[in-house]
Image: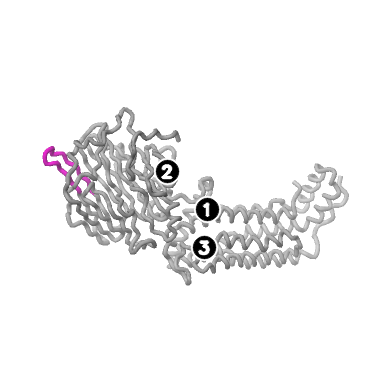
């Protein structure tokens, strides 16, 4: 069962409990893409012609005199954050390893590029001709690569090709900084009219998680349109050629925790946007070939930026253009509601970890307690409202019996009763529903935040993975049972449905949370434990109010 569906069921069950508790004492009141005309090789995206463009002749390679048979050579760029291996064929990246993140699916650091694939390869399109730049063997400078350490300035790796007979030059320059995952790319091709460049983002990222199926499900491409906002599409859903038309602020391919993003160059005008994204199905399941189009200026120059790294909201937000939304939180219809809380949660997590030097597991525990403390007044109000409802229920039942044949009169008298005793029929529900956007935001943040990835705690090897011996889900269910037991005992209810709910709901919640991230279970367990003192206090109040009803009999009514 998918994580989102599990959570939806959990929330639905919680809502049922809230509503049932009160009902026991109720008041009476995109155009289809064009047909593919010829087969496309896996990993290559068919580019639709711009208005006035003829379909390109793929065999026409004379623009750059392609077909250089020089041997492939590799060069490495190493920074404190990553190691990228480039090929001289097309200046494409054959490997991108993130030094600060360990892969759980292979030895060593996280790898972004699948085996045998490349990214950042370019295709130059001019009118009716199209040239795959990986067919060109570039000269590399510096030939021994680049090594950057902390405190050093940016450095540039240059790829240059000059045809010996035509004298035509193609140049690609990658600039790297030691403290950033953002790479600046500038290039130049021969000046031609109606020219464009398509940069390859590959067929999705390499698998780096133990739960391969979950990592594959998270694979998607997305773009931030200037007018329509952010749109995303799972790679597994690409069954035929698809296009996401521009202008775009950025385009990306992501997995659960990592992302490759293409952004426009830092300039304005034609350098300030991307022209679109193309996706093409490939043979491998849950994957699709994705490329990003961008304009080439009249002088043959182009520029873009590439973010190649983890999905860390603070790093992505620093890039701008809402890049932190590349991995949107929650269901689409809930995002406008929960988005404001997501930033606050991330800030709280980072503050507790960085400023107070708390481990992430203790951060989750502290947040669980803090949320419970902040919600204490709302919970107190809801519980007391339920007590008032219980107190007037005998009187309400008398009214129901007396006016059973006159529903309109029954409603009038019931509402009058509530007004006399200052009872709000919805008072038991609304205070508990108000904090739900916060609780939903907490769920999705803790289920997907990269800070918890690979972090051990006590017997837990990884806070982003399920508890291997299932202690936390069982403890979560037990704590939920205890909370309900305290509440039911105070109410002294003999209602069989409530008693059945007390036993069944904890079991269902254990099943739902059984395979969810252990960090998420840790948070909810801390939240439940922090609720117990308040539940005991409320139970005592209920016992004091139980002997009688501090309300006059309804008396004769007109």
| Residue 401 placement, left or right of 108 | right
Do the residues bearing badges 3 and 2 touch, measured as CB atoms within 8 Å? Answer: no
Q: Is residue 397 above or below residue 407?
A: below
Q: In this figure, which residue is indicated by the disc labeled 1? A: 4
Task: Name the element at disc 3.
Answer: helix
Circle 2 is placed at which residue position? 238
Between discs 3 and 2, the one toward the N terminus = 2
Residue drawn 17% across and 51% down?
71
Colouring method of the image: one colour
Q: Residues within 10 Å of mark 1 (few under 14, many from 20)?
A: some
Q: Quadrant of residue 542?
A: bottom right
Picture coordinates of residue 408 (x, y %)? 80, 42
SS label for mark 1: helix
Quarter of the rendering occupied by the C terminus: top right
Give residue 62's position: percent from left, percent from top. 19, 36
Report the residue marked by disc 3. 367
Q: Is residue 273 visible?
A: no
Residue 19 visible to an observer of this rendering: yes
Which residue is more in the foreground, 152 or 326? Answer: 326
Where residue 157 sits: x, y (%)? 21, 52
Disc 3 to disc 2, C-alpha distance:
39 Å
Q: Is residue 533 magenta?
A: no
Estimate the spatial distance between the alpha carbons at disc 1 and disc 3, rounded to whole Å. 22 Å
Please name whichever residue, 128 or 51, is drawn nearer the observer in this view of the structure: 128
Q: Reading the chain from its start, which is encountered first: label 1 or label 2? A: 1
User: Is 506 displayed left or right of 201 in the figure?
Assistant: right
Q: Start and end of the magenta stretch?
A: 159-173
Percent across and percent down for residue 252 are: 37, 47
């Amino acid at each position: 069962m998918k994580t989102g569906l599990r959570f939806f069921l959990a929330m639905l069950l919680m809502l049922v409990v809230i509503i049932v508790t009160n009902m026991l004492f109720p008041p009476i009141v995109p155009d289809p893409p064009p047909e593919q005309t010829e087969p496309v090789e896996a990993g290559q995206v068919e580019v639709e012609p711009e208005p006035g463009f003829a379909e390109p002749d793929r065999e026409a390679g004379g623009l750059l005199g392609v077909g250089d048979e020089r041997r492939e050579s590799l060069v490495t760029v190493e920074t404190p954050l990553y190691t990228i291996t480039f090929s001289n064929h097309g200046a494409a990246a054959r490997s991108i390893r993130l030094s600060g993140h360990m892969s759980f699916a292979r030895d060593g650091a996280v790898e972004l590029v699948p085996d045998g694939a490349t990214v950042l390869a370019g295709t130059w399109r001019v009118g009716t001709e199209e040239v795959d730049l990986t067919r060109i063997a570039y000269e590399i400078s510096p030939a021994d690569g680049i090594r950057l350490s902390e405190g050093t300035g940016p450095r540039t790796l240059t790829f240059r090709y000059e045809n010996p007979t035509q004298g035509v030059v193609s140049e690609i320059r990658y600039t790297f900084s030691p403290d950033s995952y953002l790479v600046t790319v500038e290039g130049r091709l021969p000046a031609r009219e109606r020219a464009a460049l398509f940069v390859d983002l590959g067929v999705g990222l390499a698998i780096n998680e133990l739960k391969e199926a979950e990592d594959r499900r998270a694979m998607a491409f997305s773009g931030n349109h200037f007018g329509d906002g952010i749109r995303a599409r799972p790679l597994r859903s690409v069954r035929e050629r698809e296009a996401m038309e521009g202008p775009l602020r950025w385009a990306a391919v992501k997995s659960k925790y990592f992302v490759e993003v293409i952004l426009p160059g830092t300039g304005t005008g034609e350098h300030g946007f991307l022209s679109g994204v193309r996706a093409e199905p490939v043979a491998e399941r849950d994957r699709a070939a994705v490329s990003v189009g961008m304009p080439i200026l009249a002088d043959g120059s182009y520029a873009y930026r590439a973010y190649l790294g983890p999905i860390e909201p603070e790093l992505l937000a620093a890039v701008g253009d809402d890049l932190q939304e590349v991995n949107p939180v929650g269901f689409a219809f809930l995002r406008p509601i929960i988005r404001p809380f997501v930033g606050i949660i991330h800030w709280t997590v980072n503050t507790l970890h960085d400023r107070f030097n708390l481990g992430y597991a203790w951060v989750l525990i502290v947040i669980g307690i803090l949320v419970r403390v902040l919600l204490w007044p709302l919970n107190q109000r809801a519980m007391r409202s339920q007590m008032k409802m219980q107190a007037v229920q005998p009187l309400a039942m008398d009214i129901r019996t007396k006016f059973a044949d006159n529903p309109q009169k029954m409603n009038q008298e019931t509402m009058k009763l509530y007004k006399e005793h200052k009872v709000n029929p919805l008072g038991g529900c609304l205070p508990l529903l108000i904090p739900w956007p916060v609780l939903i935001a907490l769920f999705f943040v803790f289920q997907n935040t990269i800070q918890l990835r690979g972090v051990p705690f006590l017997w837990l090897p990884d806070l982003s993975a399920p508890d291997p011996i299932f202690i936390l889900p069982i403890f979560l269910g037990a704590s939920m049972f205890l909370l309900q037991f305290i509440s039911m005992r105070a109410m002294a209810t003999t209602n069989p449905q409530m008693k059945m709910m007390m036993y069944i709901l904890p079991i269902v919640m254990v099943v739902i949370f059984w395979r969810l991230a252990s960090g998420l279970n840790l948070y909810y367990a801390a939240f439940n434990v922090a609720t117990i003192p308040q539940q005991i206090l409320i139970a005592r109040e209920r016992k004091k109010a139980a002997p009688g009803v501090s309300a006059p009999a309804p008396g004769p009514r007109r």
